[in-house]
Amino acid sequence: MLVKIRPGAELTGAERELVECLRAYPSTGLALVDCRVGDRRLGAVIVTPRGITVLEVKGFRRRQSGLLTTTAEGSWQISDSPLDLDAEPANGLTDRVEHGVHAVRVALEQALQDSRHVSGAVVLVPYRGVVVRPARTTLRPGLDVLVANTVDAHELRVYLEGFSAGPREWTIDRVLNTCATLDVAEVPTRAELAEDGFEGSRPAPKPVAPQVRAFSEPAPPPDPGRRGKLVGMALFAAALLGILVVFVVVGVALIQDSPNPRPMSDTSQTTTTRAPSSATPRKTECWPFQRDC
């Protein structure tokens, strides 16, 4: 990583330790140590191809080891003991780094630059050989606490690789504009930035091949089998036969119908002939001494 220190800067022991860690860091980045933004002094401003992070660097007054517990309100402890820093108490460190992030964002916005990918962290540098765990924790979204020194800088490297998930938009020109915006006295050259790994221009987006839908012609209908052909012919013959029968019935009806039908009056008059009666005479019963019997 490319490291630039402000001329005339008076670095603390923890800041000098951080400079050694950053110079040994193999990835692309520009560290502006003892950076001044307005009237605010920042421990370091690190620019990577994916964003910017503001670091507050603090060392210990004495050897302290154990489990680190932090809160956003400022109560930081190591194994139930208050954090003993060499410059100032831990109270207010969260606000200090948050104010530093805000100052960088305001400066970028005033220069009409993107200020979205700006984060912040507090870097605690313990004495060499002292173990402090956990080596990384999160205070608030975008604000972290790291423990690192030249003996164990693993968590610092992991943080610098992943503190921002933005695209690789910080090119050489953008880094130079950021340095001018932050009023950096020791500005790196284009050759130094290119040698460190910064790209000369924003990488072109990968072309996306248009999706072409392949339209296939509909498959021809299946060829009916011999049995299907016979059934079709039989149905067709039955239909023709039915039509022929209908025509025959209609023709017969027309032929049998008389062209001069009789009127209804002729058909309604009927003659009735009374049949002769062949009744036999009734036998009369005669009594004695009856006359005419």
Image (cartoon, rainbow, N blue to C red):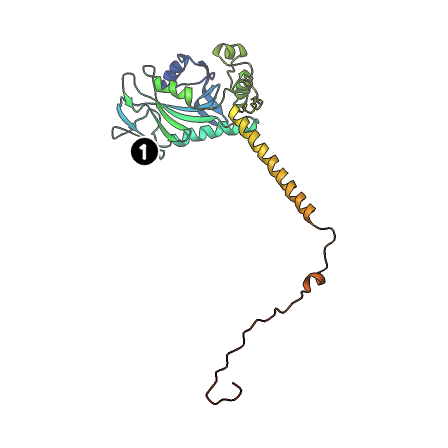
**Residue 60: x %, y % from top left:** 31, 23
232 versus 4 height, above or below: below
Numbered disc 1: secondary structure: loop
244 versus 105 height, above or below: below
Instruction: Give the residue type that dot 1 points to.
Output: Ser
Using the rendered image of the protein, determine whether residue 114 is visible from the camera's viewpoint.
no
Q: Nearer the viewer, residue 18 or 62?
A: 18
- Could you say which quadrant of the image residue 252 lies in? top right
Q: Nearer the viewer, residue 237 or 1?
A: 237
**Residue 198: x %, y % from top left:** 50, 14
Q: Nearer the viewer, residue 61 or 234?
A: 234
* Residue at the image point whose x is 46% and y is 88% from the top: 288
Using residue 73 as the reference point, say whether residue 280 is left or right of it. Answer: right
Name the image quarter holding the N terminus: top left
* Residue at the image point whose x is 35% and y is 23% from the top: 146
The residue beneath circle 1 is 75
Using the rendered image of the protein, determine whether residue 99 is visible from the camera's viewpoint.
yes
Using residue 198 as the reference point, say whether residue 162 is left or right of it. Answer: left
**Residue 206: x %, y % from top left:** 54, 18
